[in-house]
């Protein structure tokens, strides 16, 4: 989401974080229809040979979305009452060393998360990207350059398609999950994603881990305070120094487990919508 790495001042970071949080808070409930995944592979091309072969086995994985969520903005998913599930989402990587550190924590706790990747960081850290996929986490598109400003339709297309391509070439993954940088829905990027039937994933609760002054315990507190079934939690592994998020992650997981939550990826969460 937001960070000075992507070229913003501290004051702007805070206001953007608040604005994005407010946007999430003001979200309308996710619309429900009876259509569920009747054609979830729509638009996903047939799986073919990976373009780049390497020693590391490239997995062919498609993160497609149920038809009712294609071209839609999602803040939280209404799940059956008995399902106390929550989805951790981790933005702006792959990143050194934080992504690998977070992977270890997730593995130790048997938790699967969803990573929203910036294209140019996938290009910079292909081995980390492969490892994330090999460990069974879900992947989303977070654009190539992480722009906040308004872009032309041609730039929006390039930002998203280039990122889709590097994700595919590096890991064999096709994804129809999209998260707009900074949570901005009106600068042209989300519009292009919607036009291509991506599901635009926002969040229902943020760790607020882009706050440069907060202690890591605050991130934990934010997440535990706002947790709700079907919720989507925002945090970051990249875009800056995320050592505090790494520290917070085990306590977030522990606290959520104590509250009775189990962890699902975004594709799993979308599938659970009745
Ligand atoms: Zn971001």
Image: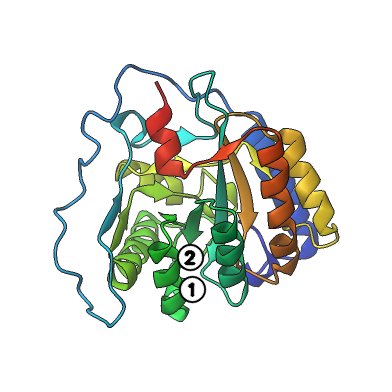
**Residue density around tag 2, few if under 14, some if 14–19, many if 20 or more, within 10 Å:** many
Q: Is residue 207 visible?
A: no
Count of number-bearing discs: 2
How far apart are labels 1 and 2 at the CA level?
5 Å
Coloring basis for residues: rainbow
Q: Is residue 132 visible?
A: yes
Q: Position of residue 208 (x, y in %)?
A: 73, 50
Q: In this figure, which residue is indicated by the disc labeled 2?
A: 118
**Residue density around tag 1, few if under 14, some if 14–19, many if 20 or more, within 10 Å:** many
Q: Kindly identify the residue that appears in the image at 47 percent across and 78 percent down.
A: 125
Q: Position of residue 133 (x, y in %)?
A: 39, 63
Judged left or right of residue 238, residue 242 is right
Q: Is residue 186 above or below residue 119?
A: above
Front-most of residues 265 and 177 = 265
Q: Kindly identify the residue that appears in the image at 34 percent across and 58 percent down.
A: 157
Front-most of residues 228 and 194 = 228
Pointers 1 and 2 in contact (CB under 8 A)? yes
Judged left or right of residue 64, residue 104 is right
Q: Secondary structure at mark 1?
A: helix
Is the C-beta of the residue carrying label 2 under 8 Å from the nearest atom of ligand 1? Answer: yes
User: In the rendered image, which quarter contains the N terminus?
Assistant: bottom right
Front-most of residues 264 and 254 = 254
User: In the rendered image, which quarter contains the C terminus?
Assistant: top left
Q: Is residue 242 above or below residue 62?
A: below
Q: In this figure, which residue is indicated by the disc labeled 1?
A: 121
Q: Secondary structure at mark 2?
A: loop
Q: Is residue 243 above or below residue 63?
A: below
Q: Kindly identify the residue that appears in the image at 20 percent across and 70 percent down.
A: 50
């Amino acid at each position: 989401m937001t960070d000075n790495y992507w070229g913003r001042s501290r004051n702007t970071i805070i206001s953007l974080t608040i604005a994005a949080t407010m946007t999430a808070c003001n979200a309308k409930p996710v619309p429900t229809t009876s259509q569920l995944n009747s054609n979830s592979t729509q638009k996903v091309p047939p799986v073919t040979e990976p373009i780049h072969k390497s020693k590391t086995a490239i997995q062919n994985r498609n993160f497609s979305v149920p038809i009712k969520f294609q071209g839609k903005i999602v803040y939280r998913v209404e799940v059956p009452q008995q399902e106390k599930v929550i989805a951790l989402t981790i933005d702006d990587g792959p990143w050194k060393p934080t992504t690998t550190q977070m992977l270890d924590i997730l593995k130790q706790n048997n938790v699967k998360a969803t990573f929203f990747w910036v294209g140019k960081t996938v290009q910079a850290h292909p081995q980390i990207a492969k490892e994330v996929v090999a460990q069974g986490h879900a992947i989303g598109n977070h654009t190539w350059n992480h722009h906040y400003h308004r872009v032309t339709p041609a730039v929006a297309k390039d930002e998203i398609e280039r990122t889709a391509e590097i994700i595919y070439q590096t890991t064999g993954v096709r994804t129809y999950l999209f998260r707009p940088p900074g949570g901005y829905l009106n600068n042209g990027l989300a519009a292009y994603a919607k036009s291509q039937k991506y599901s635009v994933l926002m969040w229902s609760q943020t760790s607020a881990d882009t706050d440069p002054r907060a202690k890591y315990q605050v991130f934990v507190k934010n997440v535990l305070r706002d947790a709700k079934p079907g919720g989507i939690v925002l945090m970051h592994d990249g875009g800056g120094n995320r050592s505090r998020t790494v520290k917070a992650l085990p306590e977030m997981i522990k606290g959520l487990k104590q509250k009775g939550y189990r962890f699902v990826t975004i594709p799993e969460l979308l599938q659970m919508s009745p």
